Amino acid sequence: MEAKIFYGAGGYAIQNFSRWLEKIGEPVCFADIDSKKHDKLFSLGSKDSSEGYPIYSLADAITKYPDYIIYVTAQPGNLQSITNYLLEQSIPKERIRYCEEVVYRRGCRQLSGEMVVSKYGITACCTPYSKLISYNEKMPTEQSVRSAIGDFRLWLKDTLERMKTDVPTDCDGCSLLKWDYWPRDVEIRWLSAGAGFANTTCNSAVFTVISQIRLFLEAIKF
């Protein structure tokens, strides 16, 4: 029976452990590159320091559990460098998995769940590379914002599909774009106010629209 070793005893693991526990199952231990954490218990935020999972060095963990499978706990976008490190430590590729459901493609943080609303329209970020989906009305209304959201969803879905290959996208040229392991499914989790948003005549109107469709936005998945 495989022994699940969670690699990375940090804050992201604390935030998401309960979800991973349900999806992946219980690890036998954690492993971490930080020697200050070795041979201690990872309490995962519990106030009781006597509870938790043991943290070992990578070498000690795989020696203790030779039938191991390593699950990398890092946030998507930081997985490639850790994967390279594990491969350098002679961990076979087939024994490396990820706690999050990810795919290898081009991407960036801004394409992983953020939608920026401004007086001009909706976009993925405030850089000049992301396509701006304009409203079809001068003064945004719930209907025009919903329409722009629909167009944004189509643009983002197409862009992420293109980023699995070298097919050109609107984002090409952006310094934030890189090949890494990114979320397989993108869900809008953040709603930001973009440039040109504050102190405009449509400021209150857009906030009203945002409040009206917040539940709708939280349910969007690509």
Image (spheres, grey):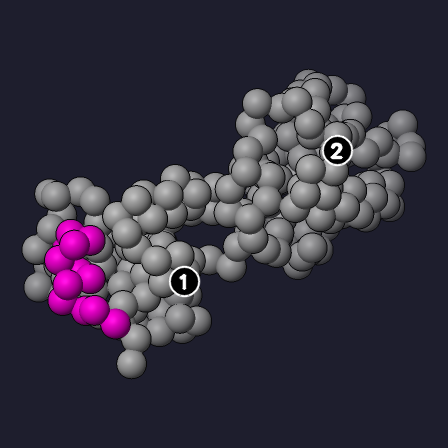
Vertical placement of residue 200 versus 139, above or below: above
Circle nearer the viewer, 1 or 2? 1
Percent of width and height locating residue 127: 65, 22
Residue at numbered disc 2:
168
Looking at the picture, how far across and down is residue 157, in whole percent?
73, 48
> For the point 42% across and 45% down, which residue is it?
79
Left or right of 75? Residue 54 is left
From the viewer's side, name the closer residue of 14 and 102. 102
Task: Name the spot of residue 26 as percent of width and height, x first.
Answer: 30, 72
Residue 178 falls left or right of residue 149:
left
Q: Name the foreground residue: 65 vs 131.
A: 65
Type of residue at label 1? Glu
Residue corresponding to mark 1: 94
Residue located at (76% from left, 46% from top): 158
Q: Can residue 186 be seen in this view?
A: yes
Q: Which region of the structure is painted magenta?
A: 56-67
Q: What's the residue at 19%, 69% (across, down)?
A: 65
The CA span between labels 1 and 2 is 31 Å
Mark 1 is surrounded, within 10 Å at the Cα level, by few (under 14), some (14 to 19) or many (20 or more) other residues, namely few
- Disc 1 secondary structure class: helix
Q: Element under label 2?
A: loop
